[in-house]
Each structure stands twice: as C-alpha cells, then as structure tokens.
Amino acid sequence: MSDRHPPANMVDDRPAAPSHVTYRAIAVVLLAVIAVELFMSTRQESQVFDEATHVFAGFEYWKHADFGRNPEHPPLVKLIAAAPLLPLNLKEPGVLPFPYFKGQDFVNGSQFLYSADADSILMRSRLTVALFTSVLRARDV
C-alpha cells in the first residue's frame, strides 16, 4: 500500500473551504459598508486645510490645462474631484502677486471655494472621489 493515499476508512474532518460565492458575498457586503462610510463622511466632515487647494488645482487642470498648480501631487484624483464642478460656472479667483506659489494656491483655493456654495462644492467633489474609489474596488469582486 502506498503512503500517498490515506486508508479508505479514514475520515477527513477538516471544515470545507468557503466557496467562491461566499467570498464574493462577503466582498459585496464590505464594499457596501465602505460606500456608506464614504457617503456619511462626505456629509459630516469639515474641510481639511488643503482640500480647497486640491479642488481648485483640479478645476484649473480642466479649464486651462495648468498643471503647475499644486504640482507636488499627481493630478488624477484632483481631476476626478473637480469634474462635477465644470458645469457650475464657478468664478475663478484672480492672479495674486505672491512670489511663493504655495501661498498663491492656498489663497486662490479658499477664494474659489468660498466665493460660491462651499458645502455643495465639497459634497460634489467628495462624492465623486468616493464613487471612483468604490468603482475601483468593485471591479475586483
């Protein structure tokens, strides 16, 4: 008798591995929880200190292809966050005579955000990024 095969009377009492359907169901439930958390946080959180700068930079990328705004971060998420703002006809702040571009971006971002309905702008931007995050995760399920 070979050592490779267990005897016929031996019972395998290991639990069965979860099925592919079980893993998929767990993933869908977790994605739903993440989506709810993202939506709730977009409504309840206040603006972070550089959020206006990033949203304004994304807006400038779309309007003028000006990738010199906020160059220390890649543009993809800023472009996504600013996309729902394009049809709103928002007022762009004027150029400031600041020698330091970070200061200019910070002030222009605040002027851009608060010259209109800041809550609406932030909500649109945040929800679009949350949707983007959810879609990226859902493609793996």
Image: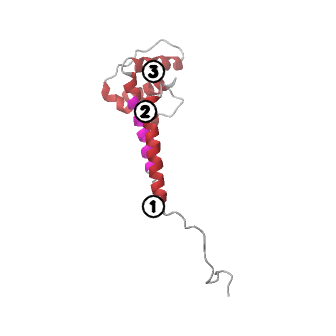
Earlier-in-chain disc, 2 versus 3: 3
Disc 2 to disc 3, how far (Cα)? 16 Å
What residue sits right under mark 2 in the picture? Answer: 126
Q: Nearer the viewer, mark 1 or mark 3?
A: 1
Q: Is residue 108 above or below residue 132?
A: above
Near mark 3 (Cα within 10 A), the count class, few <14, some 14-19 or many ≥20, is many
| Mark 2, secondary structure of its residue | helix
| Position of the N terminus by quadrant | bottom right
The amino acid pointed to by label 2 is Arg
103 versus 62 height, above or below: above
Residue nearer the viewer, 23 or 61: 23
Q: Is residue 129 magenta?
A: yes
Q: Residue furthest top?
A: 97
Which residue is outermost to the bottom?
1
Q: Earlier in the sequence, mark 2 or mark 1?
A: 1
Give how far apart the Cα atoms at labels 1 and 3 are.
Answer: 47 Å
Colour pattern of the rendering:
secondary structure
- Residue that mark 1 sits on: 21
Residue 60 in percent (x, y) is at 41, 26
Q: Is residue 29 part of the magenta span, yes or no?
A: no
In which quadrant of the rendered view does residue 25 lie?
Answer: bottom left
Instruction: Residue at 60% x, 74% y: name it.
Output: 12
| Element class at badge 3 | helix
